[in-house]
Amino acid sequence: MSLRLHYGTTTKVLHWAIVAPLLVQYLIGWLMPDIHRGMQPGVGMTFHVSIGLVLLILIVLRFAWRLTHPVAPESSLPTWQRLTSEVVHWMLYVMVLLTTITGWLFASFRGWSISFFYLVPFPMLFSNNPTAGKAIDGLHQATGWLLLILVGVHVAAALIHLLYYRDRIMARMLPR
């Protein structure tokens, strides 16, 4: 398997297809009212969980695509930037995966009956378990915050390359 020098169309589409629902997820998550014990999820939670499933599918596809279609790190970068970039990218994959899975587990442990965008019943991974639900909610919140921090680092690095270094690093992921 040879390394490519540039990101292909599929890589770019998967990247931006993950960015858009992530933005929506954080907006829904912050605007949604707290759901207390005994309450059923409303429209906001149904969409939050449904978009989470879309993200789970997309991140698995993106991860598989990256493993089978690797791209060489930009050779013009100093070693520390190449290594940092690789670590942040892999951590982003892991955190999107963990955040979506912990969200699904949280909905399962709460015993919610949710459908995928009101079309298809959403399969629950476990039965109602309030103690596990509370624990996994904390983990879901923590992974969500860590993911947000990593996204911030990723965006900041892209903007630094665009505005300070004025190199073509960010252009590698933009449509041509």
Image (spheres, rainbow, N blue to C red):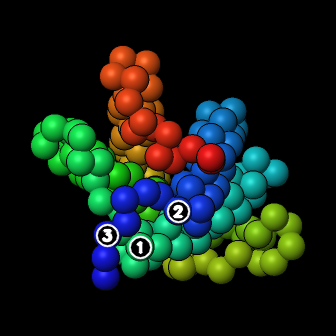
Amino acid bearing label 3: Leu
Q: Residue at x 36, y 74 (%)?
A: 67
Between marks 3 and 1 in the image, the one whose residue lies nearer the viewer:
3
Name the residue carrying label 1. 69
Q: Residue furthest top?
A: 164
Mark 3 sits on what residue?
3
Q: How far apart are marks 2 and 1 (CA)?
A: 9 Å
For badge 2, the amino acid type reads: Gly
> Is any part of residue 5 visible from this angle?
yes
In what quadrant of the picture does the N terminus appear? bottom left
Q: Are dots 3 and 2 in contact, CB under 8 Å? A: no
Q: Is residue 156 left or right of residue 41?
A: left
Who is closer to the viewer here, 163 or 129? 163
Q: Which of 176 and 142 is in front in this view?
A: 176
* Foreground pick, 175 / 45: 175
Q: Is 124 placed left or right of 85 in the picture?
A: right
Q: Distance between the residues labelled 3 and 1?
A: 7 Å
Mark sitting earlier along the chain (3/1): 3
The residue that mark 2 highlights is 8
Marks 2 and 1 close (CB-CB < 8 Å): yes
Determine the residue positioned at 38% across, 30% down. Answer: 167
Q: Judge the density around disc 1: few (<14), some (14-19), many (≥20) Cα neighbours within 10 Å.
A: some
Do the residues bearing badges 3 and 1 touch, measured as CB atoms within 8 Å?
A: no
Q: Is mark 2 on a helix, strand or loop?
A: loop
Q: Position of residue 93 (x, y in %)?
A: 40, 59
Q: Earlier in the sequence, mark 3 or mark 2?
A: 3
* Secondary element type, mark 3: loop
Residue 110 falls in image quadrant: bottom right
Q: Can residue 103 be seen in this view?
A: no
What residue is shown at x 56% (from left), y 56% (from top)?
Answer: 12
Q: Position of residue 32 (x, y in %)?
A: 69, 38
